[in-house]
Image: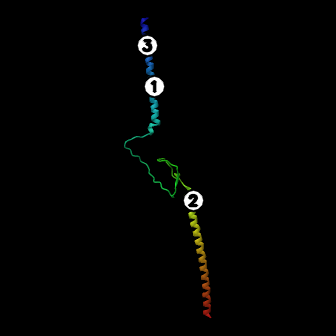
């Protein structure tokens, strides 16, 4: 009996030690899986370097019309599509230019009408002169 008691005593610490080692291995395995998941989801998309060159398109943006910017709808380095509105301008400036253009158009229309009236007067004067010429030729022929 003495030999079997010694065997039981020797196996008990060995079984507990084995459980502890399995638990530690599982902790390291879970930590490794979590680190791999973190690297795949977060760190793999991040690039670091001391000396890097990035190829990209630089596009100069300029306004088609002058005005005051009231809203910027795109951030720095944001991907934008062709035709996408990037800024909003103050409509007061556009309304001012529109009213100024309307007044210039109205003045031009008045000037054209006046020139047509003057041209009509000249046409009438030419018709009168032709009649006078015809009468003078008739008088000369007598």
Query: Disc 2 or disc 1, which is closer to the eye?
Result: 2
Query: Disc 3 or disc 2, which is closer to the eye?
Result: 2
Residue at the spot x=59%, y=67% of the render?
106
Residue at the disc numbered 3: 11
Residue at the disc numbered 1: 27
Residue at the spot x=45%, y=17% of the render?
16
Q: Earlier in the sequence, mark 3 or mark 2?
A: 3
Which quarter of the rendered picture does the C terminus lie within?
Answer: bottom right
Residue at the spot x=56%, y=63% of the render?
100
Q: Residue furthest top?
A: 1
Query: Which labelled disc corresponds to residue 92?
Result: none
Residue at the spot x=44%, y=13% of the render?
12
Q: Position of residue 56 (x, y in %)?
A: 43, 48
Query: Crowding at label 3, few (<14), some or many (≥20) Cα neighbours within 10 Å?
Result: few
Marks 3 and 2 sit apart, C-alpha to C-alpha, by 94 Å
Residue at the disc numbered 2: 95
């Amino acid at each position: 009996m003495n030999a079997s008691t010694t065997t039981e005593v020797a196996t008990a610490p060995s079984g507990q030690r084995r459980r502890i080692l399995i638990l530690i291995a599982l902790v390291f395995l879970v930590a490794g899986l979590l680190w791999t998941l973190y690297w795949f989801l977060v760190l793999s998309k991040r690039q670091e370097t001391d000396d890097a060159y990035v190829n990209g398109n630089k596009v100069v943006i300029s306004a088609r019309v002058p005005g005051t910017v009231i809203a910027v709808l795109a951030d720095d380095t944001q991907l934008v599509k062709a035709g996408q509105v990037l800024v909003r301008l103050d409509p007061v400036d556009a309304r001012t230019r529109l009213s100024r253009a309307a007044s210039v158009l109205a003045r031009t229309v008045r000037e054209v009408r006046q020139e047509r009236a003057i041209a009509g007067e000249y046409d009438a004067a030419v018709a009168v002169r032709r009649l006078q010429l015809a009468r003078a030729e008739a008088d000369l022929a007598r």
